[in-house]
Image: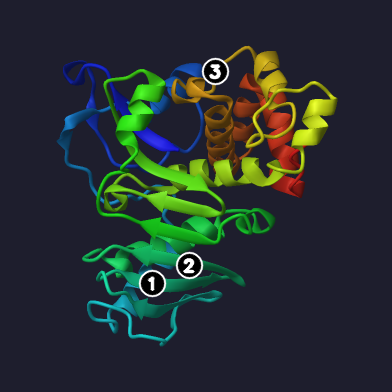
């Protein structure tokens, strides 16, 4: 789950939309500042720009060319090619005014629904880029993305659970589905990676629980086996948000690992030095899909 939380709004920083990540991690101070800037915000000032994190310039430029012939909406049942290996088709206009699409990214089909009035032509190319940058064997954990104009109706319930006065969800993930709130204003590459982290972690749910019980492990079933022990070994929190639960720690770790991996060897080495035990398992997950 991606969210922004507040205790006293006047004490927090203005909310910012997801932004391009730096070219490399620069140590503890830089990582901590990124986490704070990403997670803490003043809900009174919400003037974000469109998400740009992890944007692929080639994909975007080709998508813009494709959009030129689309008008305000995709034509029903007419596939549109955004780039080689990436197509989108609008399957239906639903009775509530929302639009239902199917995206095919290198053979991986993902359904996407947008609430009435949302600009599918802008967001679909961004989503294609996010999915493309996810390892192929992990993309299979995602089958549908649901964009909502409004807030998560469970925000008040979550605020009580976390013991905070206010809580605003950016996105949630469960059962191979990502739900995105507030029209996707706060949903960029890193937020997408965080939610995919939840889906990857949940793969062992239902079939590893018995293994945990036999071995007297007590990790929740939506994290890899032994993740709690790896967190304890590292002696560091990956982020302030990750302290809320082991599941959030794993999703945060996965997102930061994927960012470091894309930035190159120096950033990946810095992540591994800071979180050696987490990094070792994340490498196996990303390279081989092994969540044990």
Q: Which mark is residue 177?
A: none
Residue at 62 percent of width and 72 percent of height: 107
- Residue matched to label 1: 100
Crowding at dot 1, Cα within 10 Å, few <14 / some 14-19 / many 20+, comes out as: some
Instruction: In the displayed orientation, state which residue is furthest to the right.
Output: 214
For residue 256, side relative to residue 91 (left or right): right
Residue 49's x, y, as percent?
Answer: 23, 47
Q: Is residue 177 above or below residue 30?
A: below
Instruction: In the displayed orientation, state which residue is furthest to the top.
Output: 235
- Quarter of the image for the C terminus: give it: top right
Residue at 37 percent of width and 50 percent of height: 180
- Residue matched to label 3: 237
In the depicted view, which residue is nearer to us: 272 or 173?
Answer: 173
Mark 2 or mark 3: whose residue is earlier in sequence = 2
Q: Are marks 1 and 3 in contact (CB under 8 Å)?
A: no
Point out the frontmost of discs 1 and 3: 1
In this orientation, does residue 33 appear? no
Mark 1 or mark 2: whose residue is earlier in sequence = 1
* Mark 3 secondary-structure assignment: loop
* Mark 2 secondary-structure assignment: strand
- How far apart in space, not on screen, are marks 1 and 2 (Cα)? 7 Å
In this orientation, does residue 227 appear? yes
- Quarter of the image for the N terminus: give it: top left
- Residue matched to label 2: 111
- How far apart in space, not on screen, are marks 1 and 3 (Cα)? 39 Å
In the depicted view, which residue is nearer to us: 254 or 112?
Answer: 112
Mark 1 or mark 3: whose residue is earlier in sequence = 1
Q: Is residue 130 above or below residue 110?
A: above
For residue 272, side relative to residue 157 (left or right): right
Picture quadrant of residue 6: top left
Q: Are marks 1 and 2 in contact (CB under 8 Å)?
A: yes
């Amino acid at each position: 789950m991606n969210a922004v939380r507040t205790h006293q709004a006047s004490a927090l920083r203005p909310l910012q939309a997801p932004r391009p990540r730096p070219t490399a991690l620069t140590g503890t101070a830089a990582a901590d500042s990124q986490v704070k800037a990403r997670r803490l915000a003043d809900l009174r000032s919400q003037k974000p720009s469109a998400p740009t994190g992890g944007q692929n310039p080639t994909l975007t430029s080709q998508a813009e060319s494709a959009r030129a012939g689309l008008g305000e909406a995709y034509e029903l049942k007419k596939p549109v090619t955004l780039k080689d290996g990436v197509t989108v088709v609008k399957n239906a206009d639903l009775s509530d005014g929302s639009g239902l699409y199917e995206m095919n990214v290198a053979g991986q089909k993902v359904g996407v629904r947008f609430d009435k009035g949302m600009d599918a032509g802008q967001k679909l190319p961004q989503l294609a880029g996010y999915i493309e940058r996810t390892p192929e064997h992990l993309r299979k954990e995602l089958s549908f993305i649901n964009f909502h104009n409004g807030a998560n109706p469970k925000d008040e319930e979550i605020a009580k659970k976390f013991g905070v006065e206010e809580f605003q969800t950016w996105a949630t993930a469960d059962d191979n589905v990502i739900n995105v709130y507030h029209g996707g204003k706060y949903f960029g590459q890193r937020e997408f990676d965080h939610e995919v982290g939840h889906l990857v972690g949940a793969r062992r749910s239902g079939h590893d629980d018995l293994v945990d019980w036999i071995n007297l492990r007590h990790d929740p079933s939506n994290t890899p086996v032994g993740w709690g022990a790896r967190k304890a070994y590292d002696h560091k929190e990956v982020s302030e948000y990750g302290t809320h639960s082991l599941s959030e720690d794993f999703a945060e770790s996965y997102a930061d690992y994927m960012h470091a991996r894309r930035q190159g060897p120096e950033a990946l080495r810095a992540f591994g030095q800071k979180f050696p035990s987490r990094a070792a398992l994340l490498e196996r997950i990303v390279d081989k899909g092994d969540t044990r």
